[in-house]
Image (spheres, rainbow, N blue to C red):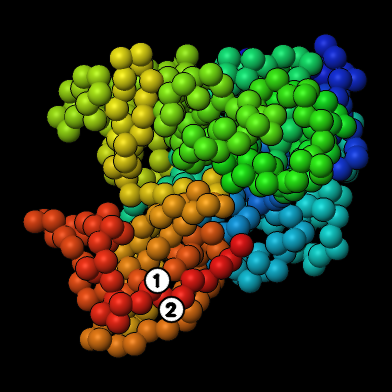
């Protein structure tokens, strides 16, 4: 068993070397590395008592909390595969992912118990065990995670040579991301990938044993889990976990705990710089402020600098985690750049024939090395489309300048980012096309001051029928998470298309020729 590749072993080592060092600060409570190791042991023993074995999937849907981290560690310790779920998803979306990943156990926060009950997984086949975290009194068929794990206090899991990563490429996490087909894909991330992501984050953040990292990004995403929490554990640092982002609380804890490292999406920073100067706190302890997850405008970088956040940029995707980074100086010096490739990765730009392009020419970003995913879970077709000849094709189009700085040009795979969340138009279009009065629909991302990008739906009504914009958007209820809903609707008589029949979406955005025959855009629906 290769212990050095296992995050649970890192916690064990820090519990031996510095048992009293604070690992987690959460809502006024401190959890040392010794206690975090004990929590991971208790959760591991409980999983074994349920019959969870190496290779079994364990799904988790919780707000940021110590229980999430404890279960994450326990799965790694046993060799079970951790499946973090986005708690913003609807029941229908969750049902697809759970049926696709087929976890033996699903642990969820008490806030989501009604959502889970509505899915009616109790008594289903294959059987999936259910547990609620948070001490909520529930029916007997749903276990109490807190009470159950407490029964194994002081015990250690029974480990055999077959448990834990015998091979660095064994699956560690399956993280789901939507795709151009409209159905989520599960990126299988290995233990080796987790380690090398930590090594890249170590270099990017200049991490140290004494660092204090504030985590407001959701842990079910790569940013919160693999760029912040896991690297901090690797270095033996301290993480402050917030259940959700709150600008006032963020300022307060940066000052109170002398936070040294922070990461946020542009939406987070826009909220922080909009706080009145007199209501802000001292943030001089911050040594690194990182920004990523979506497009970053030069104007936002300047606003952040004036507010005291000298931000450096990162860019990546679920399948690779951190891929590019740019220093504070380079972010200002080269407006629009996403930076240069991280240390532990091979990155190239290629044309359609797979040939490398020259400086300033546009090509697709491809990646090779220990940071790339292993495969898409139970999806060999998409795996073969994405990983070819050992290179992972990201679907992002970019150019590179003479100094090696990359600039995103477009997304070959149709996608936009709203508030740090990936939104794939095909997924939204698939739902809206089911409306009885819709002939065709095309969804695109358009700039938005608060969220970076929001969706705009261009709709051709069926046989000239009238459609209420509000009722059309409400059709997404229960089928799509709210952040995926288009912000507004534009009715069209036809779509501009290529000679192959593909919709030319940018023409829809830029030319009023294809707006409604009534000449009016649909009223906006605000979901802020």
Instruction: Answer with left or right where residue 418 lies relative to residue 207.
Output: left
Q: Residue at x 47, y 32 (%)?
A: 316
Q: Which residue is mark 2?
A: 469
Residue 72's place in the image compared with 165, above or below, is: below
Specify few, some or many for label 2: CA neighbours under 10 Å numbering under 14, 14-19, or 20 or more.
many
Looking at the picture, how far across and down is residue 255, in whole percent? 84, 31
Mark 2–mark 1 contact, CB under 8 Å?
Answer: yes
Outermost residue on the left side: it is: 499
Residue nearest the observer in this picture, 373 or 363: 363
Specify few, some or many for label 1: CA neighbours under 10 Å numbering under 14, 14-19, or 20 or more.
many
Looking at the figure, which quarter contains the N terminus? top right
Disc 2 to disc 1, how far (Cα)?
6 Å
Looking at the picture, how far across and down is residue 491, in whole percent? 32, 75
- What numbered label is drawn on residue 489? 1
Looking at the picture, how far across and down is residue 39, in whole percent? 82, 34
Q: Is residue 483 visible?
A: yes
């Amino acid at each position: 068993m290769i212990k050095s590749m296992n995050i649970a072993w890192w916690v064990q080592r820090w519990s031996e070397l510095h048992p009293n060092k604070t690992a987690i600060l959460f809502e006024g409570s401190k959890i040392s590395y010794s206690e975090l190791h004990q929590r991971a042991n208790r959760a591991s023993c409980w999983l074994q008592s349920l019959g969870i074995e190496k290779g079994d999937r364990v799904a988790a849907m919780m707000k940021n909390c110590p229980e999430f981290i404890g279960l994450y560690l326990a799965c790694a310790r046993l060799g079970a595969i951790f499946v973090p779920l986005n708690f913003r998803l609807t029941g229908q979306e969750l049902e697809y992912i759970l049926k696709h990943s087929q976890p033996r156990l699903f642990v969820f926060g008490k806030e989501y118990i009604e959502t889970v009950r509505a899915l009616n997984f109790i008594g289903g086949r294959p059987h999936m065990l259910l547990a609620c975290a948070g001490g909520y009194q529930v029916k007997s068929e749903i276990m109490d995670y807190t009470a159950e794990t407490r029964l194994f206090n002081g015990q250690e899991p029974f480990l055999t040579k077959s448990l834990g990563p015998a091979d660095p490429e064994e699956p560690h996490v399956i993280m789901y991301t939507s795709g151009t087909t409209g159905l989520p894909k599960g990126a299988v991330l290995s233990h080796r990938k987790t380690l090398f992501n930590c090594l890249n984050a170590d270099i990017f953040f200049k991490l140290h044993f004494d660092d204090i990292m504030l985590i407001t990004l959701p842990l079910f995403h790569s940013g919160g889990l693999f760029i912040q929490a896991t690297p901090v554990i690797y270095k033996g640092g301290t993480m402050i976990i917030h259940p959700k982002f709150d600008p006032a609380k963020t300022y307060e804890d940066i000052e109170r705990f002398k936070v040294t490292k922070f990461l946020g999406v542009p939406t987070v920073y826009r909220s922080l710089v909009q706080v009145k100067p007199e209501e802000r706190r001292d943030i001089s302890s911050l040594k690194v402020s990182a920004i990523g997850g979506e497009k970053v405008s030069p104007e936002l970088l300047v606003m952040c600098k004036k507010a005291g956040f000298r931000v450096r940029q990162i860019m990546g995707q679920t399948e690779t985690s951190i891929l590019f980074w740019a220093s504070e100086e380079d972010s200002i010096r080269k407006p629009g750049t996403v930076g240069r490739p991280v240390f532990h990765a091979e990155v190239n730009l290629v044309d359609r024939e797979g040939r490398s392009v020259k400086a300033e020419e546009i090509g697709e970003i491809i990646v090779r090395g220990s940071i790339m995913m292993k495969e898409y879970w139970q999806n060999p077709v998409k795996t073969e489309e994405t990983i070819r000849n050992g290179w992972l094709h990201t679907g992002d189009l970019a150019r590179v300048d003479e100094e090696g700085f990359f600039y995103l040009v477009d997304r070959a795979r149709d996608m936009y980012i709203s508030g740090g969340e990936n939104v794939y138009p095909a997924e939204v279009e698939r739902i809206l096309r089911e409306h009885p009065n819709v002939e065709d629909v095309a969804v695109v991302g358009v700039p938005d001051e608060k969220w970076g990008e929001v969706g705009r739906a261009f709709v051709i009504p069926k046989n000239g029928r009238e459609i209420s914009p509000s009722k059309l958007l409400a059709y997404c209820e229960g089928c799509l998470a709210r952040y995926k809903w288009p912000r507004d609707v534009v009715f069209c008589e036809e779509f501009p298309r290529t000679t192959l029949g593909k919709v030319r979406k940018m023409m829809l955005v830029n030319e009023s020729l294809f707006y409604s025959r009534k000449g009016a855009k649909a009223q906006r629906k605000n979901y802020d």
